[in-house]
Structures are given as structure tokens and as C-alpha cells.
Amino acid sequence: MKYIPQTEQDRSEMLKVVGVSSIDQLFQDIPEKFRLPHKLDYPMALSELELRRHFQNLVSNSPRDLLSLAGCGIYQHDIPSSVSFLLQRSEFATSYTPYQPEVAQGSLQCIFEYQSLACQLTESELSNASLYDGATSLGEAALMAIRIKKKSEGKILVSSALHPFYKQVLNTYCEDFLDRFVEIPTLEDRLDLQFVEKNLSGADLLITQSPNLFGCVEDYSQIAKFKRDSSVLWITSTMEALSFGVLRGPGAFGADIVTAEGQSFGNHPYLGGSTFGIFCTKQEYLRNLPGRLVGETKDEDGRRAFTLTFATREQFIRRGRATSNICTNNNLNMLAGLFHMVCLGKSGLQEIAEQNLSKAEYLKSKLRSIGGIRVSSQPTFNEFVVETSSAASSLLDRGLTEGVVLGVDLGKFEEKWKHKLLVHASEIHQKQDLDRVVDLFQKVSR
Amino acid sequence: MITPEGVRSILTHEEELVFEKSKSGRSGYSLPALDVPKVSPQSCLPENQIRTDGANFPEISENEVIRHFTRLSQKNCAIDLELYPLGSCTMKYNPKINEEMAGISQFRSLHPLWPQKLLQPALAVQFQLQDLLCRVTGLGAVTLQPSAGAHGEYVGIKMMRAYHRAKGQEAKKTKVLIPESAHGTNPATCTMVGYEIVSIPTHPSGVVPLEDVLPLIDENTAGIMMTNPNTLGLFESNIPEISKKLKEVDALFYMDGANFNAILGISLPGELGVDIMHINLHKTFSTPHGGGGPGAGAVAVRKDLAAFLPAPIVHQVGDHFEWKENIENSIGRVGGYFGNFSIQLRALAYMLSIGTTPNNQSTYLRKISEAAVLNANYIRARLKNHFKIPFDRICMHEVLLSDELQSEYGIKTQDIAKRLMDYGYHPMTVYFPLVVAGAMLIEPTESESKQSIDRFCEAMIKIAEEAKQNPEIVRTAPHHSFRKRVDELLAQKQPRLRW
């Protein structure tokens, strides 16, 4: 077995040193009737060549060269080759949590740089080392805010334009507080701001997402004005972190906890996992923060060094009184995000965000000229809702026959959205792709 | 012979922060020219929300990006460089074929919200992985949604609560029993789910004796959470009886499977009486730990508990696969999409390569556990005359030492760990479990050869000698790492958490 270096001779020498006569003796603590026979109902071991055949066989019927306009929380972007190259460095991939700073300065400095960039991106004061993904970050944010509000029993206002999977995770995490939840209705796919204004006093938490499920950019400057006179803790969620290339970070509007899905930076879709969750907040909530945190310090010789810090919030020290149970997170996905952000730099971030905006606006303008198609007139970033008289699911089916995924059918979440197709365009879509999509819409809307 | 000089690092580049390297006008990225009309943010986005500063990201060229992060990588220990004996972390070798399989572009580009007929390869992977996990746990159903071990614990304990709710017993079932030696995530998880924790003290034998645990079980007990083998490296041989007693009060047995690598193909948790367990795919099934994840924390349960699993679960329907969304008493969704699929791919590749041996007499699963357990016992035998072994008996896949003998010379676990760096090793897990003062938990895994283990033992024995003869060199270690001892207190006193 190529993964086990022990030889027969090694084994007998080692058993002798241990002072037992057989391997089986090492398992004597397992009650005999619970020890399995050597055989197990399990498939034959595959060699490398067989494995390759097995996996290639699994994907053999996958469509190739599919043109996809699916977004809704997971986006396909252009990832620089440097990102994949750096991720293969064994020193990043095959190390573990940097509990021993003297031999983990690589990981630690990377996390420190990531924390800094996450703060800059979201215009926040403080970032942790990242969490699992955008949805669980929102769940953790709600639990953190409820902890900060202690015994208060105020309402928890939640946007009804929140991605349904995020809503489901939020419901799971906040199971004991669901009676305090109040849904904020939408008007034309954006939050009903009058409702927000009216209900803010007496509320503990306000949870919003922008761009929201329908791709619309919410009016955060207006919410910021309402919030000024209340004691509400405002939590924001963002599915497309690349939107911060053209949109102010929620921190700039006074959001207390800013969460986002980080996938667009450096991570392929992979069925939605693994990705990483951006989690930022204000300095004053430092001790309430879930997850790891890296700080700058010095070594004995006075040289700059980095280390995990404020660990007394965490489960391995605080146990039952920790701010979260999180231990292993999605560090390598965060590193992919860091590498990508650094490659982009200031001008790259701006350019890629503007290209996304331009492609989506181009597609919008072309679709608007087709009769029978309604295109959202709200401000959007790189995805928007298209409505026709036929169900979105049938549009999708028609598109698939020509090798195009026209978007995400929001009707799969809620019956009332069955005419809404969420369409996404990014830097990877060429003009000819978008024109092909327009032709398809022309055909199917006839 | 192993000496610090023999492993002295060449990695001495001082590396600035990326922000300090930035120079206006540089970039490490290129895009094609825009082929549609350029739209300015001002023309379509709310004016007071527009941003034009590019988030002030640092500006460096591609070659500088590569050099910066390659240099930083060289300041890390890693399994691909040397034995990495972190106890309870199972730092085994991560086969490269698994990376290749996970890198297949048709998997990489799968969008979670595509129509299911386009996702069949992914569903097939998940279905097969669920099946193999059932076979190695002896349990009837599996969810792959949790992103890590602690996330799996959260799912498992939530399910415990949902089970009692379905029986109308939620208000009464308020307590979960947890041994003192447990990972911190266990009590933290129970608090998150809303359970009161009853601590089971550690017995001198190292395993939980029936007479200690039985009196703690009463009608308010929702369940027990036990790591097996436990964090002292010992098999909890009373699990079947404990489980039986729990059944009498309709309480559930949760097994923390962090240490599953010791009993693969040797014992089935389902047969021991375990009702729910999580499996750290990244530990037992060998996916790279990534400096702290991504992991994957699959949860396996007794067949009749499947109704509480987080939705969706993959089912086979005729010749294709479907996600079953409506699960009767499901605890709900716990993660954005369908778990850490990129990790599930690697775990499946590994699980397929460690199956039944060609002669059909055994499994490589079993051989892996045997080798891991033999390696740990060999370390115990070689070090027992040099270090205190608090529970000196046959151990499973990890061995626990303490600094009791070295304390006589003023040398603590911390010092031994730092000195180990000078010999080229990442230290073992230190000061855990908390129930043993100055604990050092060593898990070699099956990936190490006898020569490799001998070298490690020689280094440990040398450090034990140095502690007697030249304690100063141990107390002031490390001397050869990129950084000398790092001041962790200063980081907290003068917090500097971003650039």
C-alpha cells in the first residue's frame, strides 16, 4: 500500500519494542464482540489509474462548453493562474491552524493581510480570519448581535429579499428566536423603506442583503439615516463581494456587522463549496467576535511577528462559554481570496467590477428592446430579474436545448416568483455570448 | 544523527507586508478590453453609494505577488516537509491523485443552482460517499452538509434536540453529559444548541468507568457526547453499556469522530451503540488541512434518525440521483449550498483507494488504523523512560506525555514544544487535554515510516537530556526558526489587527 511506509520487518521490530506479539493485541481494549473480522463489506481498492477512470467516467456525460448565466450567490469569474499556482504550495495546503507562531509566520502574515483587505473592501474596522461561507456568516452574525443585546426581547427585522438558502440557515441558527422575526416587505424588488423606518424603534436587529436576491442594490444611505436615531444593530449580507469594487462598503453606512460570501474572490463554483465567509464588525465588538483573529506583535529579538490573538473568545479556551464553536474554518479558500485580491490590486478591482456592470447593463438594454420581456428597472450590479408571461422554468428548459443556462429560476424557491428568472453577466461573457442569449430570448418569448 | 544544525533553516528572507510593497500604477492582473459599451457607475447606481477608490487594494505586479506569497509559504511547517505530530488533528499524508481528481474542470465549474440533470456527476459523488461512510460507521444515513467537525457537532446535537422535540420531551431533556477530557468544541456546541452541560470527571484509568457515568444519567439527560478513542488516546470500552443505559431514559449517544483514524475497519460505531457521529473527512480521509480548513464534517446517524437530517440528502431514483428537499423533521439547512463539495471529492478519491485488498482478505482501511496505532505505541515505548506517560498502557492512534519529569529542571511543555522546532518538527498538541498538567499529545499517523518515527524519538530523547544538562537552551528555544519566541501577550495588550 503506497500510503503506508511500514514494512513487514519494521512491524515485527516495532511490536517487539512495544512488547506485544501481534497487532491484534494493540486493540485489546475494544470488547471482542465489537471487533470486526478482517473482511468488510467494502469495494475493492482502486489504483491511481482506476481512480482516474472512475472519476472521468462520472463526468463523461457532463455538457461541455455550456454557456451559463446562473449566479444567485455563486459566480463564475476569471481566476488568475497565479492563484491556483500558489494554492498548490504544500506549505499552505498541508499545514494546519497556526497555533505555533514561530513556525507558522507564513499562514499568520497571510491572515493578517486578508483581515486588512476585508476591512478595506467592506469599509469596516475589524475582520476575523473568515468563516465557512456567506450564509453561516450571517447566522453567526445574528447570534453575535443577539448576545450583544443580551436579555432584550426586541424585534428582529429580516429582509424578505434575502437569498432563501441564507434565510434557511438563519432560521436554523436562530431557532430559539424565531418568534421575534419580522419580515420586511419589498416594493419593486427592493426593501420597503417606509416599513423599515416605522419598525426600527423597538427593534434589536436589522438584517439586510445588498445586492439582494433579485440583484437589486438596496438604499443603504437611507437606512443609515433611519438607523442613526435607533439602537438597532444592523447586520448586512452580500452574496457578490465583487460588487464592492463599485459600491461603498456597508461599514461606510454604519453597519454593525458586515458579512459576505467571498467565493467570487479566487474560488471556483464547486457546487457552492468550499468557499469562505467574510465577517467584519466594529472595534467595540472585538470580544464578541466569532472565529480566529490574527494580530501583530514582536518576537524575543524585537522583530515583527504575527500570532493568533484574543483566543479567550474561542472554544479551545473558553469551552462552553465561547463566542462560537467554530474551530477549523475554510482557511485555504480565504487564501485563494487573498491571492486574487492582491493580484487585482486597486485598478484591477475597479476594472473588473466596472466590466461586470457594463456587461449586465448591455444585456439589460438588449433584452428591454424585446417585446413581452420585463427587465428590472432598479439599480443592479451584475445580475437582474427578467420576467415574461411564461414560467422561468420553461425559459430555462428552452435555453438548455441550445446549451445555455439562461439564469436561475427563482420559482424553485417560492411559487410566487415563478415568472422571475435571475440573469447574471460578468467579465467572462463575451459580447457574442450575450448576443446569443438575446437571440435565444427573442425566440423563446415569441 | 539528528541535530538542530542538520535542519537549520535556509528560509531567512524578511518579508514585508504586501501593503509596504505597493507602488501606485502596478497591477498583477489583466482583462480583455471591454467589448460592450462602457457604462459608468454614475449612470446606473445610486450616487451616494458609488465607490471609486478600488478599496485601496495594494498595487503589485504578478511576479511580485508570486515571490511574496512563495516566500511567506516557506515560513510554515507542513506535512509535505516533515512529520507533523499534532494530536487529535490526524496530520496524515494527502495523496496528490486526490488533488487531481478534485481539479477536474467539469466538477470545478458546477453551479449549485443549475438544473439537477446538469449536476448528476456531483450527486453521484455525494451518493457514493454517503454509502461508503455508512459502511465504515455501521450507521444508516449520512449528511455531507457540515463544513467542518464543529459544524458537524452542531448538526448532530441539533438533531438530538429535534429528536426529543418530536417525542414531546424537549422541555424535560435539558442536559448533555460530556467528559472533562473533551475537545472545547463539544461544550461550545451544546451551549449553541441550548443544552446544559454535565461534566464527567476523568478517572485514573483514563476511560470513563460505568460507575462514574451511570449515576449521572437520569430522565433529564438528552444524551452524551464522547470522543472515541478519547483525547487521552484510549478506547472507551464501556460505550456499549453506557449506550444501553441511555436507551432506558430515551437519551442518545453522540460520538465525536475526530479520532476515527484509530478504528477504521476494526470496529463499527453503529454496532457499539452510537446513534449519531461526525466524521472529519479532512482528518480521517486525508484531505489537505489548508492551514486551518476547509474541512468537511459529515454526520452519520442511525437509520431511524434520518428524518432529522438537514435537507437536502441525495437519493437514487431509478437511474439518476435527486436531492430530497422535504425531510419531515429536518433541523433545516446549515450551510449555503451542499457542503464542501471540493473536499468531498478528495475524500471519495481516498476512500476508494483504501478499500478491500487485492487478495480479498482485508481492507487497507484496517491496515491504516493498524499502522497508525502501532506507530503511536512505538513512540510510547521508546519515550517511556524519558517522559512521564500519565496513562501508561496500550494506546490507540495517539500517545499522551506530560512534562512532569522535565519540570524538575524548570522545563515546561511549552519549552519542549519550542525546542522541537529546532529539530525541524512542528510541535505536538500542547496543554490539551486539560485534565493532564503539561499535556503533550502526539499523533504520528500511519504516514510515517519507522525511520521517520525513530528520528522524531531521538529528537525528543535529546531534548529530555538537554532539559537535564543544558536547560537554558531548551528554555530559550527556538533558536533556529524564522522567529524566536513570539510575544503573544503583547498582541493582546496593544492590539494591531489590520494594516
Image: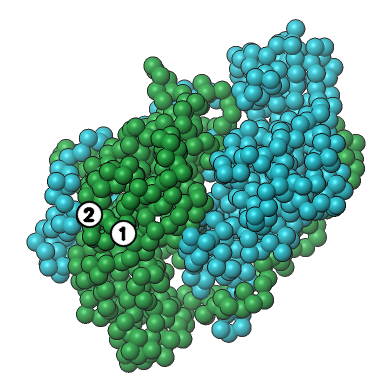
Residue type marked 1: Asn
Q: Determine the CA span between mark 2 and mark 1.
A: 12 Å
The chain letter corresponding to green is B
Q: Is residue B228 above or below residue A286?
A: above
Q: Nearer the viewer, mark 2 or mark 1?
A: 2
Residue type marked 2: Asn
**Can residue B296 be seen in this snapshot?**
no
Tell me what residue is drawn at x 37 percent, y 76 percent. B438
Left or right of residue B126, residue A179 in this image: right
Q: Quadrant of residue A42?
A: top left
Colour seen for chain A = cyan
- The subunit carrying tag 2 is B
**Can residue B333 be seen in this snapshot?**
yes
Q: Is residue A383 above or below residue B230?
A: above
- The subunit carrying tag 1 is B
Residue B269 rendering spot, x and y as whole percentages: 27, 45
Q: Which residue is mark 1?
A: B230
Tell me what residue is drawn at x 21 percent, y 71 percent. B392
First in sequence: mark 2 vs mark 1: 1
Q: Which residue is mark 2?
A: B238
Q: Is residue A35 above or below residue B358?
A: below
B143 or B443, nearer to the observer: B143
A146 or A315, nearer to the observer: A146
